[in-house]
Amino acid sequence: MRLLKTLATGTTLAAALALSACIDVEMDIAVLGPDQVRVSGFTQMPLEMVDMVGGAEGFCDAEDGGTIVMTDTHARCELLMESDFAAAFPDADEAGDEGSPSITDLGDGTAVVRVPLGDATGDMGEMMEDPNMIAMMRPMMEGHGLRFSVSGSEIVSTNGTLSDDGTRATLEFPLTDLLDPENDLPAVFETIVRY
């Protein structure tokens, strides 16, 4: 799924931040069975950014379950797809591709979901070493954030935040956290979930 890979890959995320610094992402991966998953959520960016990411089709591919919604100021790609694991995360099988989200059935009624975030601040390189650039970007990033969640009948373990009912794990952070070299964001949001 190109869309989900784009959202979760640190390098691509960093490039989007460098260009716009004002994207919002929310994605939920619901593990429904031993080989069934539902991915839903959205990504949103200012209209002027759409051409920089390949136009509406490049930003929101219908084949990946995306539906684009345009307003006067923003383009929003709403995602909803239900499929088997391989169809939802086709890039996960590529040798050495650790930048892609993946889901693996552990064979005991559970699956492990991995969403690599990459070293987003490191990927932004020299730009993040310039205090003037950070000062310019911070106001643009304020009020925007990323939220990834994994759900199922029970969360067995996670490095995210567990819901009160134990069925959802969430990793959520404001984009301004990426400007802090001391942030405690994990390289990979990993959850073991019972389906």
Image (cartoon, rainbow, N blue to C red):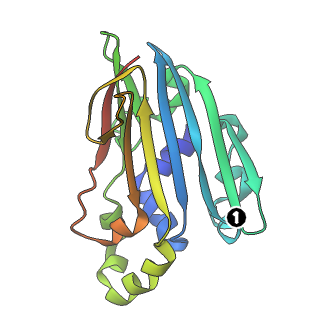
Residue positioned 23% across, 58% down in the render: 184
Q: Is residue 28 above or below residue 146?
A: above
Question: Is 62 on the left or on the right of 132, as rendered?
Answer: right
Residue positioned 47% across, 60% down in the render: 145
Report the residue marked by disc 1: 74
Q: Quadrant of residue 178?
A: bottom left
Q: Is residue 166 above or below residue 162?
A: above
Q: Is residue 56 above or below residue 90?
A: below
Residue positioned 56% across, 42% down in the render: 2
- Farthest-out residue, front: 164
Q: Secondary structure at mark 1?
A: strand
Disc 1 marks a residue whose amino acid type is His
Q: How many marks?
A: 1
Q: Quadrant of the C terminus?
A: top left
* Residue 168 spot, x, y in % from top left: 40, 32
Q: Is residue 159 above or below residue 174?
A: above
* Residue 116 spot, x, y in % from top left: 35, 45
Within 10 Å of the Cα at label 1, are there few (<14), some (14-19), or many (20+) other Cα atoms? some
Q: Quadrant of the N terminus?
A: top right
* Residue 49 spot, x, y in % from top left: 64, 68
* Residue 128 spot, x, y in % from top left: 33, 77
- Farthest-out residue, top: 108
